[in-house]
Amino acid sequence: AQTVTQSQPEMSVQEAETVTLSCTYDTSESDYYLFWYKQPPSRQMILVIRQEAYKQQNATENRFSVNFQKAAKSFSLKISDSQLGDAAMYFCAYSNLGSARQLTFGSGTQLTVLP
Amino acid sequence: DTEVTQTPKHLVMGMTNKKSLKCEQHMGHRAMYWYKQKAKKPPELMFVYSYEKLSINESVPSRFSPECPNSSLLNLHLHALQPEDSALYLCASSQPLAGGTSTDTQYFGPGTRLTVL
């Protein structure tokens, strides 16, 4: 079974600074997807960024980028130029390519942005 | 448009009540999901529908009864719930690939906050 570990329950960052959230996972599969979802106090789970395991190039989405290290099974999220609206719970998630597509979530990192 | 809608936003019910949660998407997605989420915890998968057929039931108690009347609508019928069932219930959808396998990205609705008294 796959597992996803987020070792930082809480993080804080000054507005306009950069922060990196960590995520490691365990799988025996060679092809899979990885995601970062953001859940602000408004509750809605919002997709931040997605990475296909077969792609060596790290995904980037505006101020959000990932550092995907397949051999190390590491998938960290970097937020540049942090904004107050980035404050949220961030979940790292893994998805296999099987017929029963399921998301395995990490325990989450609560990010606070300080003005 | 990646919108999944859920109604109601909030629901308070007694343990003897019968109520339903509704989820709707108009993205043409053919896989839909129900999750339960407790505060400060990740979502827990409850049910998966693929092409309007139940494909996964994560050993959910029978007091939760899912229904998928058509490809854009997903309901969760609630009956005789317990106070520990109070949680945020999230719906999600994704676009299956050919052959019934679903794609990678799930899009979530805003959730229904359920309180059982």
Image (tube, coloured by chain):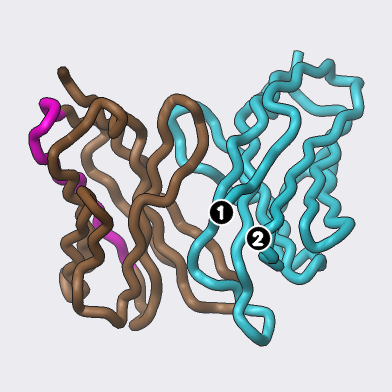
Q: Is residue B56 above or below residue A11?
A: below
Q: Amino acid at mark 1?
A: Thr
Q: Are marks 2 and 1 in contact (CB under 8 Å)?
A: yes
Q: Residue at x 30, y 61 (%)?
A: A25
According to the rendering, which colour does chain A have? brown
Q: Residue A99 sits in which quadrant?
A: bottom right
Is the residue B52 above or below the residue B87 in the image? below
Region of the chain picked out in magenta, as a range: A13-26
Residue A85 is inside the magenta segment:
no
Q: Which residue is mark 2?
A: B27
Residue located at (54% from left, 72% from top): B103
Magenta stretch: includes residue A16:
yes
- Secondary structure at badge 1 equals loop
**Which comes before the other along the chain, label 2 or label 1?**
1
Left or right: residue B96 compared with residue B21: left
Q: Rate crowding at label 1 as few (under 14), some (14 to 19) or many (20 or more) other CA atoms within 10 Å.
A: few
* Numbered mark located on residue B2 in the image: 1
- x, y percentage for residue A5? 30, 51
x and y, in percent, of residue A60 in the image: 23, 61
Q: Colour of chain B?
A: cyan
Name which quarter of the figure residue B95 lies in. bottom right
